[in-house]
Amino acid sequence: MVLRTPEGRPYRFDPGALCLELLVTGGPRSLTRHDVLDGPAGLVRWAGESRLAPGLEPLLTVAEADVRTAHAVRDAMLRITADRARGHRFDRPADATDFAVLNAVAAEPPLVARMGADGAREWAPGATGAQLLSTVARDAVDLFTGPYADRIRECSTSNCYLLFVDTSRPGRRRWCAMERCGNLHKVRAHRARQSAV
Ligand SMILES: [Zn+2]
């Protein structure tokens, strides 16, 4: 996904999982970004920018009700993800309401992939917002219960709240994006060394 710095400079942010891509659209916390899921068109646009693209956006029909579901499942995923990132996983009871929201959305039928006439993968026609959100919720269930469940992190910059899953082999990812927070850190560390001399 392409995000923008406060100065408007674009940078690539790969949160490592489809479900985490939905978290950058807004949320219940006082996040800096305004909510881009402000109507059906917003959800369709998000699908076109997500890792489900290409080819999904023109097939997709989204209703107002899907937007309300999108907000509910996103906010539930955001709380669960932030909880995991801060290591609360085993030392406090799970939020049953958030799990119930996620499970209900995941229980709906997901998007259907098929083989196109040219033998390549494509999305089956008639894709709906409900199918889209089910696909995202199923991805979240897989993430929160899968091999990378303990690799969910928040960017190490103190005022950056981007959440990601570290799927790298060494498992030492600290930043949302190297070209954003990683470089800021390098510059600061360099300045600190210079001023110490
Ligand atoms: Zn960051």
Image (cartoon, grey):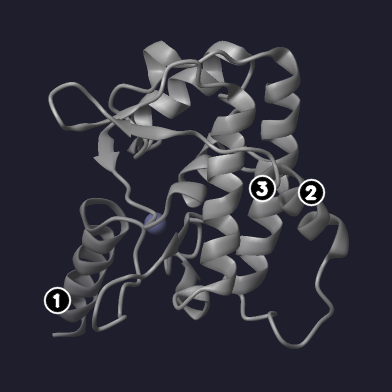
Residue 97 image label: none
Residue tagged by mark 3?
A: 106
Place residue 62 in its image quadrant.
top right
From the viewer's perspective, tell me whether residue 117 is left or right of residue 72. Answer: left
Residue under the point 28% across and 51% down: 180
Q: Quadrant of ligand 1?
A: bottom left
Q: Are marks 1 and 2 in contact (CB under 8 Å)?
A: no
Residue density around tag 3, few if under 14, some if 14–19, many if 20 or more, within 10 Å:
many
Secondary structure under the numbered disc 3 in the rendered image? helix
From the image, state whether disc 3 or disc 2 is nearer to you. Answer: 3
Alpha carbons under labels 1 and 2: distance apart: 51 Å
Q: Establish if 178 lies above or below 127.
A: below
- Would residue 193 be seen by someone viewing this image from the given angle? yes
Question: x, y (%) of residue 131?
Answer: 58, 31
> Which SS class for mark 2?
helix
| Tag in front: 1 or 3 | 3
From the top left corner, tell me how far across and down residue 52 is, in percent: 37, 36
**Residue 88 point in image, percent of width and height:** 69, 80
Residue 192 versus residue 124 in the image, above or below: below
Q: Amino acid at mark 1?
A: Gln
Q: Which residue is mark 1?
A: 194
Residue 8, image quadrant: top left
Q: Which residue is mark 2?
A: 101
